[in-house]
Image: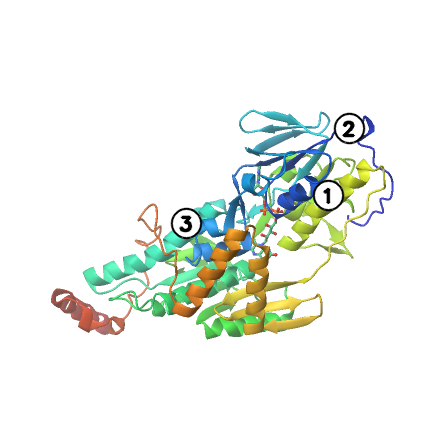
């Protein structure tokens, strides 16, 4: 797929009849937003439908999860992004079904809408490889809600450890386990290590957050498998410098509150995060056209499912092949596909043949922690960078691509503040104060010699000494 030459003219009924085409864009992510902003400049009427009212800049979600940034720094209302375009409207609703023959979509609210063009860009979601029950114990990171839940769990673990140390003189080991060694897993691990070892180290009196263990469990032979091997190795080195343990070939066979089973062994986990698998949004399958095993819709070189030139599939939901390889589900292809849809609709309007889509790959980068990153640069020159140059490049590019002037400014200042003062700005625990799995911890209690005795109360000191001696005996 993605290789069929399609220089033929496409005839869309609305265009033939001289009507102004109605374009429904489902999904206000990278692909949907780029399509909307480019299509809004054409003589068409646009409706953007998203089940959330905001566009989320997913590459910075982990910074919300680890309390560097606030949710509003990385999310912008779709309505305000499209405010300046009178031919664009926004509907907050969830598409649940399609009638391809009648060119109509139905939404959860019951509203039905007809279209001349449909742009489907509903992205991807977590895949627990059939073990959906694991989601409760190991949340993934995809939305603002996921990020604030992870933030809650991580920060709560330190609070509970401090309280338990005060009460009993010991606490379960602070093991933070990340399942999956792709870019998201690596970013999360580095950021948890940073928060524990750098930003919170002076904030507690009874525990030492720097003693927390951060582990990446990767089932494959190496982390960052989509990157060149030398950059994978550089990432492992940089993670080791941050104190993150990387375990490759580590097959997780069970995830329960408080622990995971890996290669047959129980590993206590005060917080477990899932970063191991993604699958396409279920809307791909609902469309009733050919999909791949992850549910991505097979598209031709003009981003259409076979036989439906009025339907465009963009971003993570599209299975588009170029030069024999599937284009990856990352932000750049999503944005370029969105832009290209507008190019093709414009060609239809002018009765010109559609230009096939071609992905222009500028490279990939993953951040690892403070001053640590890897970058596989493919444009405007080829290079493999790691450490500070890669981190600076990552920083600059992410600021540049953030939507909204305000967000760019606030994120820049938040980062600068964090960098120079070693403090984090959004360390808020909201919602429940129950940490799933806290009670199920069975690991050896953290050794009392890690406790700053001189700051403890006399009663606590006695209790602490008793625990210390009983631990020594055992
Ligand atoms: C934690 C994380 C970190 C990442 N880091 C990077 C990175 O560093 N670099 C990079 O290039 N890529 C990164 N990615 C990948 C990148 O974010 C995605 O490839 C990109 O967001 C895909 O864009 P999209 O428009 O296809 O989907 P999305 O951006 O996911 O947008 C899909 C939209 O569809 C909406 N939607 C879904 N279902 C429905 C429905 N039924 N009805 C209405 N609306 C619906 C959703 O609410 C959402 O707004 C990261 C992804 C994650 C999750």
Q: Quadrant of the C terminus?
A: bottom left
Does residue 303 show up?
no
Closest to the observer, 217 or 394: 394
In the figure, is residue 427 to the left or right of 81? left
Q: Residue furthest right?
A: 8
Residue 184 position, x and y percent, is 53, 58
Q: Nearer the viewer, residue 87 or 205?
A: 87
Q: Secondary structure at mark 1?
A: helix
Which disc is residue 149 wearing? 3
What separation in Å lies between label 1 and label 2 (alpha carbons)? 17 Å
Residue 323 numbered mark, or none: none
Q: Secondary structure at mark 2?
A: helix
Q: Is residue 63 above or below residue 51?
A: below
Mark 1 or 2 closer to N-term? 2
Q: Earlier in the sequence, mark 3 or mark 2?
A: 2
Residue drawn at (41%, 57%) of the image: 67
Packing grade of label 1 (10 A; few <14, some 14-19, many >=20) is many
The percent coordinates of residue 407 (x first, y second) are: 51, 53
Q: Give the left or right position of residue 411, taking residue 31 as reference.
A: left
Q: Is residue 447 left or right of residue 61?
A: left
Q: Which residue is mark 2?
A: 14
Residue drawn 69% across and 51% down? 336
Residue at 65% from the left image edge and 46% from the top image edge: 34
Above or below for 415 versus 405: below
Dot 3: element: helix
Q: Is residue 25 visible?
A: yes
Residue under circle 1? 341
Q: Between tags 3 and 1, which lies in front?
A: 1
Counting from the top left corner in percent of width and height, residue 222 is at 58, 67
């Amino acid at each position: 797929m993605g290789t069929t030459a399609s220089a033929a003219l496409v005839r869309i009924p609305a265009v033939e009849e001289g009507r102004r085409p109605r374009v429904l864009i489902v999904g206000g992510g990278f692909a949907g937003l780029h399509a909307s902003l480019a299509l809004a400049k054409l003589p068409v009427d646009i409706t953007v439908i998203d089940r959330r009212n905001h566009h989320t800049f997913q590459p910075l979600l982990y910074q919300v999860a680890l309390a560097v940034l606030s949710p509003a720094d990385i999310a912008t209302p779709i309505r305000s992004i499209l405010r300046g375009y009178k031919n664009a409207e926004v509907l907050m609703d969830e598409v649940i079904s399609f009638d391809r023959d009648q060119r109509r979509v139905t939404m959860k609210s019951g509203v039905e809408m007809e279209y001349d063009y449909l742009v489907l860009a509903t992205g991807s979601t977590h895949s627990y490889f059939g073990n959906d029950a694991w989601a409760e114990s190991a949340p993934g990171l995809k939305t603002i809600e996921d990020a604030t839940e992870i933030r809650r769990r991580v920060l709560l673990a330190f609070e509970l450890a401090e309280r338990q140390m005060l009460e009993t003189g010991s606490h379960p080991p602070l093991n933070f386990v990340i399942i999956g060694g792709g870019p998201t897993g690596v970013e999360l691990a580095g950021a948890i290590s940073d928060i524990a070892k750098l930003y919170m180290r002076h904030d507690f009196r009874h525990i030492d957050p720097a003693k927390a263990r951060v582990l990446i469990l990767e089932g494959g032979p190496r982390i960052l498998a989509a990157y060149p091997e030398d950059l994978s190795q550089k990432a492992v080195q940089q993670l080791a410098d941050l104190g993150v343990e990387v375990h490759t070939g580590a097959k997780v066979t069970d995830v329960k509150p408080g622990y995971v089973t890996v290669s047959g062994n129980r590993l206590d986990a005060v917080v477990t995060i899932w970063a191991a698998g993604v699958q396409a949004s279920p809307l791909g399958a609902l469309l009733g056209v050919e999909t791949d095993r992850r549910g991505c819709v097979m598209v031709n070189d003009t981003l259409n499912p076979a036989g439906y030139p009025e339907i465009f599939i963009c971003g993570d939901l599209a299975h588009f092949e170029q030069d024999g390889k599937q284009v990856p589900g990352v932000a750049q292809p999503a944005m370029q596909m969105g832009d290209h849809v507008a190019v093709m609709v414009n060609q239809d309007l002018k009765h010109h043949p559609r230009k096939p889509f071609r992905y222009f790959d500028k490279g990939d980068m993953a951040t690892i922690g403070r001053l640590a990153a890897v970058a596989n640069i493919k444009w405007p020159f080829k290079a493999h960078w790691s450490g500070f140059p890669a981190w600076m490049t990552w920083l600059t590019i992410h600021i540049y691509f953030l939507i909204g002037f305000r967000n760019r400014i606030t994120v820049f200042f938040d980062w600068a503040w964090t960098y120079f003062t070693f403090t984090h700005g959004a360390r808020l625990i909201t919602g429940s104060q129950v940490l799933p799995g806290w009670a199920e911890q069975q690991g050896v209690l953290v050794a009392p010699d890690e406790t700053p005795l001189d700051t403890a109360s006399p009663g606590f000191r006695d209790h602490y000494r008793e625990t210390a001696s009983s631990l020594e005996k055992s």
